[in-house]
């Protein structure tokens, strides 16, 4: 670089300011110190290995073999290819002298200037990165004399040595042997090398068709390096990203959001950055949202020479940022569409989870105490029929219709609706309260692995585990339990046997002498479990309300509690269940004192949240 002296008058330059007195060119004061800095600038040994493979691809290799081995207790890494090898001198021998004495003067840069395509290197420093891998490098290639010529270099040594050995047959290509490996590099397995190269050189391997194999003799395994495959839906018809500097290639896949999803930045097939979002200009949506996988390849970017893992913030980068704007706008549209569809699906899944949990809870709790939501009534189908789920009612096989409706006639079961082997038994209700000396009917529910009712072939046996009272017809599916004349807590047990399969369940009965019937005015009609909808009302204190006309629970998505719960799926699900429980208790127990309402809320939440999944 040269400087230019500009003549200015004293008035223009300002009084007292020093004048420019000369010009010159920058030069290296200590060549060996400069080489040392360059050789140690590569901070990733895997990147150094990738550069060795890239040299093979640039030499036109069709096959590259990487071997991780051990010799005399030391670890070595060997890279062998069948490419064009090292260029030869006038005597027909590999010109190792040129390689060793032209650091930072790569022949590839000259070839690129002449119009050569598909060549990656340009700095002439890739070979020096062996300093970050091992203690020494042996580079061998064949000559015109059918002998193998080998150059030896050692880490920290400014000298090099070339030897020659005769072989029976000429060896094509180039062979690098690095070792002993540095302590930290010894732990890099062949599998890790494979995965790194599959991502780092994905496009170069795809476009060149080179076959790269890794042999790990320590682990006794072989790995074929296949270009990394992305997951998700490939996005088609994306806007072109082009500028005066050149075209940008984008291959992007839309996925469910995950922090592990990244879009890599590549240049001419080689990865520069693991994530495009590492650049400040792209630390924003859609690159940081976790929806996208894939690559963006920009052949005109200028790289930091030493590590080749950074981008120079110059006009080329500015052109790239501008060129990507239309693509970013389209990606945001696609992500928003995907997010809306995902939210709808999650809402359906959440509603099914909530309704399933309440059905299970209301099998456990006394059905007569929770009548507002009739879990057996379903919405009408397209033909106007009232659908029911028999297993959701303690009176299985006896469908309940809403008032004014006729009970639908039983339909023929499909093959998949027939129950499998016995998997579990439960009691309905599993908890209840009886006045002293009274009785009630309990039922044993037998189910298969998919919660379908097992209707035949199950033998039941009821017994009193703790407490007093009596059981009528203890071998039946339905039994009548009669409470004793003294208050107590009774634990009942039932076992169900199907062949060699035995399942057991328990029920708790609270026998009390202070049992008072609750005076409640029940709604005239019985409704199925409602759905829910969101209403964004920030600043309003209400969390939810029940819309009886639509049979939905309206949830305030602008309430601070909803925003807090929406951070995690499980937390949001529990929050919605508690809102359901609140609305159910309020409507089902009108007029109860606040302490009793809270007791009911705790009871319903306890048995419902147990069944969330």
Image (cartoon, rainbow, N blue to C red):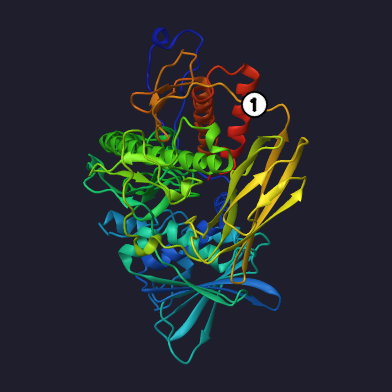
Residue 78 found in image quarter: bottom right
Residue 2 sits in which quadrant?
A: top left
Q: Say above or below: 504 vs 526.
A: below
Residue at image mark 1: 599
| Residue 316 showing in the rendered view | no
Could you tell me which residue is drawn at 47 percent across and 92 percent down? 168
User: Which residue is depicted at the point 38% across and 11% down?
Assistant: 9
Task: Indicate whether 600 appears above or below 58.
Answer: above
* Residue 78 or residue 33, whichever sits in front: 78
> How far across and down, in percent of the image, does residue 420 sit?
48, 65
Provide residue 24's location: percent of width, then percent of height.
45, 35
Dot 1: element: helix
In the image, farthest residue toward the bottom:
168
Q: In which quarter of the image is the N terminus?
A: top left
* Image quarter of residue 6: top left
Determine the residue positioned at 46% across, 30% down. 372
Q: Is residue 260 above or below residue 70?
A: above
């Amino acid at each position: 670089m040269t400087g230019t002296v500009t003549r200015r008058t004293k008035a223009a330059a300002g009084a007292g300011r020093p004048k420019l007195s000369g010009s010159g060119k920058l030069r290296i004061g200590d060549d060996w110190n400069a080489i040392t800095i360059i050789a140690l600038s590569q901070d990733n040994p895997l990147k150094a290995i990738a550069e060795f493979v890239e040299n093979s691809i640039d030499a036109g290799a069709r096959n590259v073999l990487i071997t991780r081995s051990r010799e005399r207790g030391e670890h070595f890494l060997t890279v062998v290819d069948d490419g064009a090898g090292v260029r030869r001198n006038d005597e027909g021998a590999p010109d190792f002298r040129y390689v060793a004495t032209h650091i930072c003067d790569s022949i590839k840069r000259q070839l690129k200037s002449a119009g050569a395509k598909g060549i990656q290197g340009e700095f002439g420093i890739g070979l020096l990165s062996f300093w970050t891998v091992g203690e020494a490098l042996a580079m061998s290639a064949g000559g015109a004399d059918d002998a193998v010529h080998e150059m030896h270099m050692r880490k920290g040594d400014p000298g090099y040595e070339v030897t020659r050995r005769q072989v029976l047959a000429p060896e094509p290509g180039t062979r690098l042997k690095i070792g002993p490996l540095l302590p930290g590099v010894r732990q890099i397995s062949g599998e890790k090398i494979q995965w790194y190269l599959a991502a780092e050189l994905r496009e170069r391997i795809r476009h060149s068709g080179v076959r790269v194999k890794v042999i790990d003799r320590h682990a006794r395994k072989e790995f074929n390096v296949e270009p990394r495959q992305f997951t998700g839906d490939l996005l088609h018809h994306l806007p072109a990203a082009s500028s005066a500097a050149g075209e940008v290639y984008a291959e992007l896949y839309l996925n469910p959001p995950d922090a592990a999803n990244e879009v890599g930045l590549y240049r001419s097939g080689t990865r520069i950055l693991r994530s495009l979002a590492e650049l400040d200009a792209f630390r924003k949506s859609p690159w940081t949202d976790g929806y996208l996988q894939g690559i963006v390849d920009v052949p005109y970017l200028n790289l930091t020479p030493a590590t080749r893992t950074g981008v120079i913030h110059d006009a080329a980068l500015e052109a790239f940022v501008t060129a990507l704007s239309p693509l970013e706008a389209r990606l945001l549209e696609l992500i928003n569409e995907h997010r809306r569809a995902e939210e709808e699906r999650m809402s359906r899944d959440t509603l099914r989870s909530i309704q399933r949990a309440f059905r299970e809870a209301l099998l456990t709790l006394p059905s007569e105490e929770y009548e507002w939501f009739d879990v057996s009534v379903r919405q009408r189908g397209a033909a106007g029929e009232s659908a029911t789920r028999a297993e959701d009612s303690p009176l299985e096989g006896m469908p309940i219709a809403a008032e004014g409706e006729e009970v639908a006639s039983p339909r023929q079961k499909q093959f998949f609706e027939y129950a499998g082997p016995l998997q579990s038994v439960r009691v309905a209700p599993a908890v209840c309260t009886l006045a002293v000396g009274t009785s009630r009917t309990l039922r044993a529910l037998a189910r298969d692995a998919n919660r379908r009712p097992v209707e035949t072939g199950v033998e039941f046996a009821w017994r009193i585990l703790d407490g007093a009272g009596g059981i009528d017809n203890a071998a039946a599916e339905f039994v009548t339990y009669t409470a004793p004349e003294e208050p107590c807590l009774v634990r009942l047990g039932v076992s169900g046997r199907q062949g060699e399969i035995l399942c057991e369940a328990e029920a708790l009965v609270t026998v009390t002498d202070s049992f008072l019937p609750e005076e409640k005015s029940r709604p005239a009609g019985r409704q199925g479990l409602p759905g829910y909808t969101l209403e964004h009302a920030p600043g309003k204190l209400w969390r939810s309300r029940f819309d009886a006309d639509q049979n939905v629970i309206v949830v305030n998505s602008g309430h601070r509690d909803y925003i807090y719960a929406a951070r995690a799926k499980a937390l949001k699900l529990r929050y919605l269940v508690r809102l359901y429980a609140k609305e159910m208790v309020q409507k089902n127990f009108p007029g109860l004192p606040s302490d009793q309402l809270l007791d009911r809320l705790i009871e319903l939440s306890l048995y419902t949240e147990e069944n969330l999944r």
